[in-house]
Image (cartoon, rainbow, N blue to C red):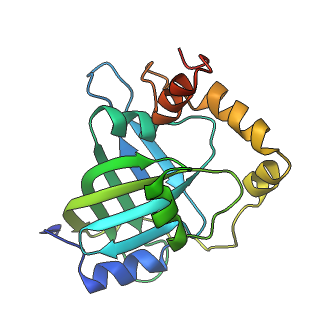
């Protein structure tokens, strides 16, 4: 049976730290917009307090979470036990995007190993925690992290990555300008119009 909590308890924190993958859910305000669900690997999730978390977001082919957070702030994290006792844990909250080269980035980045291709930090204030049984989740064995993204990003120059972000990460699939797109507009690049 599912249980609700107002904050992350020590047992929840330990469960989160034991997981090798988590999922991030977000959605635009418009009912016609697309709901987004993104899997995240690597050791990029941090718990700062019982109601404050963040993760280092790496370059991807889209940037839906960022667009949705800019528009309405809603975010859900989901962690699933693929080994050991079954459980699903969700964190519900309000998130925001922190871009590189800002004072807040400089402060938060010290909590992460900055991986090649890091594009932003997603920071969230957690309003509710929910656990559920996870009885139907199958067992999976962790074999390791894929190195494909890291190799791809390592082979790009800083300018190459910035151009990729402008091309692929400045506007969501529903036409919402992301913080990366806003940053480019302010710089006068004009590519995120």
168 relative to 183 in the view: left or right:
right
**Residue at the (63%, 36%) spot, across then down:** 61
14 relative to 21 in the view: left or right:
left
Q: Quadrant of residue 168?
A: top right
Between residue 10 and residue 115, name the one nearer to us: 115
Between residue 25 and residue 159, name the one nearer to us: 159
Between residue 143 and residue 25, name the one nearer to us: 25
**One can see residue 27 in this view:** no
Image coordinates of residue 115 in percent, x first then y, are 67, 62
Q: Quadrant of residue 161?
A: top right
In the rendered image, the vertical position of residue 177 relative to residue 54, given as above or below: above
In the rendered image, the vertical position of residue 58 relative to residue 161, given as above or below: below
Quarter in which the N terminus is drawn:
bottom left
Image coordinates of residue 149 in percent, x first then y, are 73, 52
Number of residue marks = 0
In the rendered image, the vertical position of residue 1 relative to residue 168, given as above or below: below
Between residue 98 and residue 76, name the one nearer to us: 98
Image coordinates of residue 96 in percent, x first then y, are 35, 47
**Residue at the (48%, 73%) spot, across then down:** 19
Q: Quadrant of residue 70?
A: top left
In the rendered image, the vertical position of residue 21 relative to residue 35, given as above or below: below
**One can see residue 151 in this view:** yes
Image coordinates of residue 15 in percent, x first then y, are 38, 79
**Residue at the (53%, 22%) spot, across then down:** 185
**Residue at the (46%, 65%) spot, across then down:** 107
């Amino acid at each position: 049976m599912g249980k609700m909590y107002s904050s992350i308890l020590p047992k929840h924190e330990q469960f989160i730290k034991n997981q090798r993958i988590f999922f991030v859910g977000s959605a635009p305000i418009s009912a016609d917009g697309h709901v987004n669900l993104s899997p995240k690997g690597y050791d990029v999730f941090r718990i700062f307090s019982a109601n404050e978390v963040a993760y280092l977001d790496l370059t991807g082919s889209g940037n839906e979470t960022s667009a949705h957070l800019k528009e309405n702030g809603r975010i859900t994290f989901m962690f699933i036990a693929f080994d050991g006792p079954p459980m699903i844990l969700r964190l519900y909250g309000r998130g925001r995007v922190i871009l590189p080269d800002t004072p807040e980035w400089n402060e938060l980045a010290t909590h992460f190993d900055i991986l090649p291709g890091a594009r932003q930090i997603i920071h969230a204030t957690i309003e509710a925690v929910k656990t559920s049984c996870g009885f139907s989740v199958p067992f999976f064995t962790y074999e390791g992290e894929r190195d494909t993204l890291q190799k791809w990003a390592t082979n790009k120059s800083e300018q190459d990555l910035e151009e990729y972000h402008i091309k692929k990460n400045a506007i969501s699939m529903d036409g919402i300008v992301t913080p990366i797109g806003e940053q480019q507009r302010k710089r006068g690049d004009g590519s995120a119009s």
